[in-house]
Amino acid sequence: MKVRLSSEARKDLIAIGDYIARDNPLRASTFVEELVKACVEISSRPLSYPIVQRFVLHGARDYDALL
């Protein structure tokens, strides 16, 4: 399975990095890299990471279509 980050996901990653960089610029970079690496790893085992219902945050999202 290929991983493609949506433009929204890319914006979120930038925002996360910017937020962390306020206190620790080096960690911001490595943290964002770790997030992207985790996404790539999940793509090789998508059924190993089911969506836990208590963490579903937005009822209008169609997770099956996103995954």
Image (cartoon, rainbow, N blue to C red):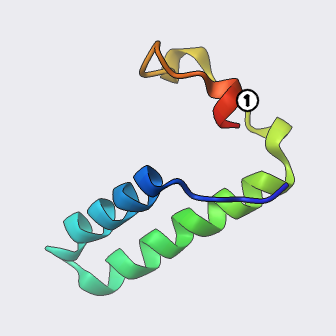
Image quadrant containing the N terminus: bottom right
Identify the residue under disc 1: 50
Query: Front-most of 41 and 62?
Result: 62
Residue drawn at (31%, 69%) of the image: 17
Toward the bottom, the furthest residue is: 26
> Which residue is outermost to the front?
7
**Residue 49's quadrant in the figure?**
top right
Picture coordinates of residue 16 (x, y %)? Answer: 31, 61
Left or right: 38 as drawn, with respect to 32: right
Residue 2's x, y, as percent?
A: 79, 59
**Hey, what amino acid is under mark 1?**
Pro
| Residue at the image point whose x is 53% and y is 63% from the top | 35
Which corner quadrant holds the C terminus?
top right
**Quadrant hosting residue 63:** top right
* In front of the other: 10 or 54: 10
Query: 3 left or right of 23?
Result: right
Q: Position of residue 43 (x, y in %)?
A: 78, 53
Seen in the image, is 4 located left or right of residue 24? right
Give the left or right position of residue 63, taking residue 33 as reference: right
Q: Residue at x 71, y 26 (%)?
A: 64
- Position of residue 49 relative to residue 53, above or below, is below
Residue 34 figure quarter: bottom right
Disc 1 secondary structure class: loop
- The location of residue 37, given as percent across then percent down, is 64, 68
Would you place residue 63 above or below residue 10 in this image?
above
